[in-house]
Each structure stands twice: as structure tokens, then as C-alpha cells.
Amino acid sequence: MADTSLKARYRQYLDCLNAQAWDRLGEFVAQEVVYNGEGIGLAGYRSMLERDYLTIPDLRFVSDLLLADPPWIACRLAFDCSPRGAFLGLETHGRRITFSEHVFYRFEQGRIVQVQSLIDEAAVRRAIAPP
Amino acid sequence: MADTSLKARYRQYLDCLNAQAWDRLGEFVAQEVVYNGEGIGLAGYRSMLERDYLTIPDLRFVSDLLLADPPWIACRLAFDCSPRGAFLGLETHGRRITFSEHVFYRFEQGRIVQVQSLIDEAAVRRAIAPP
């Protein structure tokens, strides 16, 4: 799969997340997906995303920077949202926060089989620090 | 610059860091380098690395995963080290810690001009949590 088609495929995956089209998630994520070293599988992946949207109703996945080096994708995601209650174990008090996530994805036959993700927790801490 | 040569160039940069060959840093990092949105310049970049080695004498930069999509490089770096004293503002008590860093680098004429880095602070916190 060429770079451009892998990037296009990844953008379709982000569209699927932003549409919360969970029934289509299996088109982009493999049954045996491994997330940060844990074999959570497609069902676990879907549950994780559904929980994310419960905590952050205005969640939106925006690619700020996208690299393709097949079979890998690397993406810097930029978030601008207002979590309800606790996020990453931190009480956000409903505040609007901006932070990024740096993620690597390995694709096999058009589906994500492995994810290595880091979220900028320090930015979240700074955003919700008491004034 | 082709993918392979950009990767080779990046590996030379890591070799330079691991050799602490600061006088050669300017071969790989541009004078006007911007790090996480801050225009720290080559001198600031060198100071940052020198401070890192003071805090972590056994620091070693190991590429765990490397993508090239010119002019960008994305790397997952794997660290296994024993900081002295505080690291990321956390008291490490001299413990050995393993954590990763997900970094994007933009190259211009063979030199790094922009860096976007995230360090896995949560892993550091877990590693140094009181037993």
C-alpha cells in the first residue's frame, strides 16, 4: 500500500471516530488489535472510545501532523475539548483543555493491528491547575 | 532526500547524542531550531541535552521505531536509565526507570529545524511511585 493510500485510509479511520460510527470501526481496526502493549481486541478498543466520548462529549480527532512509512502511520493529534469530570485521573472541573497525542499505528491489510500512544498529560495538568 | 538517507541521517544524530559529541551537534541541529514551540536555538538545544546528561549520567537514546516521510521523521525512543535526583520535576530516588518518548522532527538541508516531543510521564510516575 502506497504512502498516500495509507494516509487516506487513516483519515477515513479518523472520520469514523468523529462520526462515532462504532459499527464501522471493524473496517479500520483489526479484531486482534494491541493497544500500548495490551491485547484489548476490537471490542476493547470500541469500549475505550465509547468511554472517551462519555467523558468528553465534544471530543474531536484532528490530525495536526501525519506521516506514512508503510506499514506504519505516525500522527500528532490535536485536541481542544471540555471533559466532564475526571480525565486521565485528573479532575478537570469542566474546563476547556487543549493537548496533543503522539500515536504510532501499524496496519495490516488496511486495518490497525498495533497502536503505541502517548498523551500530553503535562498539558492537561497545566490546563486544570488551580489559578 | 530519500527516506533511507533521512533515516540514516537521524541515526547519525542519535549516535552524536550517545557520544555526547556536543561540538558536532550543529551538524545535525539548525541554529534556529524550535523545540515544542519554543525557539531555543542550537545553544539552548545543547544546554538542554547537557542538563539531561547531568541528571541522567547513563542516558542512552535508542530508537525503538523509526518512520521517515520527508521532510519529517517520527521516532519512538526507548529509555532505560537511572536519573540522579529529580526528573520531570519528580524525585526518582535513583531508581532505574524505563519510559518512552514519541518525537517528530522536521529536517531542512540535513538539519533538524523543528521538534515536537512527548515523554511518557505517566510511566515515570508509576516507576517511582512509593511501594
Image (tube, coloured by chain):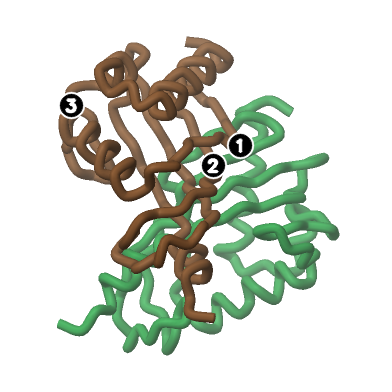
Chain colours: A green, B brown
| Viewer can see residue A39 | yes
Q: Are marks 3 and 2 on the same chain?
A: yes
Of labels 3 and 1, earlier in sequence is 3
Which label belongs to residue B76? 2
Name the residue rendered at 34%, 67% in the picture: B90
> Please, what secondary structure does the residue beneath circle 1 have?
strand
Residue B17's place in the image compared with A128, above or below, is above
Mark 2 surroundings: few (<14), some (14-19) or many (≥20) residues within 10 A:
many
Residue at mark 2: chain:
B
Residue type indicated by callout 2 = Arg
Residue at mark 1: chain:
B
Residue type indicated by callout 3 = Glu
> Please, what secondary structure does the residue beneath circle 3 have?
strand
Relative to A36, B46 lies left or right: left
Task: Identify the residue under disc 1.
Answer: B65
Task: Identify the residue under disc 3.
Answer: B32
Name the residue rendered at 54%, 48% in the picture: B80
Of labels 3 and 2, earlier in sequence is 3
Residues A128 and B121: in front is B121
Residue type indicated by callout 1 = Leu
Residue at mark 3: chain:
B
| Viewer can see residue A56 | no
> Please, what secondary structure does the residue beneath circle 2 have?
strand
Quarter of image, res A70: top right
